Image: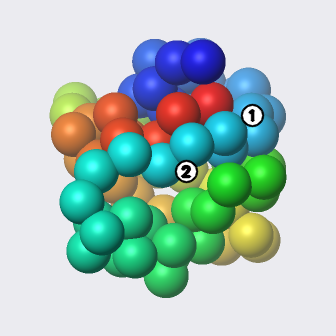
Amino acid sequence: MMPLAMADVGDVNIIKKITGQDEVRRHLAELGFVVGEEVRLISQLGGNLILSVKDSRVALDKTMAMRIMI
């Protein structure tokens, strides 16, 4: 298991665990980041990541992406 922030651009990964406080996990779940879901890293710009999850694109900063384990 590794954080999503360390994934390579273009790779498709399965979310295995979401860490952090309840409200952080709830916020990520509302964006579509739930255990068992496929997520693809589209691009990495500075400290931000563009991700594809559940047929939508979402931008997360690296600290939030470190809470998503793949």
Residue 10 seen in the figure: yes
Q: Is residue 34 above or below residue 36?
A: below
Q: Position of residue 65 (x, y in %)?
A: 37, 41
Q: Residues within 10 Å of mark 2 (few under 14, many from 20)?
A: many
Specify whether 59 is left or right of 51.
left
Q: Position of residue 67 (x, y in %)?
A: 36, 41
Label of residue 1 in the image = none
Specify whether 25 is left or right of 20.
right
Q: Is residue 10 above or below residue 8?
A: below
Task: Name the residue located 73 percent from the left edge and 26 percent from the top edge.
Answer: 11
Q: Is residue 8 above or below residue 68?
A: above
Q: Secondary structure at mark 2?
A: strand
Q: Secondary structure at mark 1?
A: strand
Specify whether 29 is left or right of 60.
right
Q: Nearer the viewer, residue 36 or 51?
A: 36
Where is the C terminus found, in terms of image quarters? top right
Q: Position of residue 10 (x, y in %)?
A: 71, 29
Task: Name the residue located 26 percent from the left edge and 37 percent from the top edge.
Answer: 62
| Amino acid, disc 1 | Asn
| Amino acid, disc 2 | Leu
Label of residue 51 in the image = 2
Where is the N terminus found, in terms of image quarters? top right
Specify whether 62 is left or right of 15.
left
**Residue picked out by circle 1:** 13
Query: What residue occupies the far bottom of the structure in this picture?
Result: 30
Task: Name the residue located 48 percent from the left edge and 49 percent from the top edge.
Answer: 18
The disc, 2 or 1, on the residue closer to the chain's N-terminal end is 1
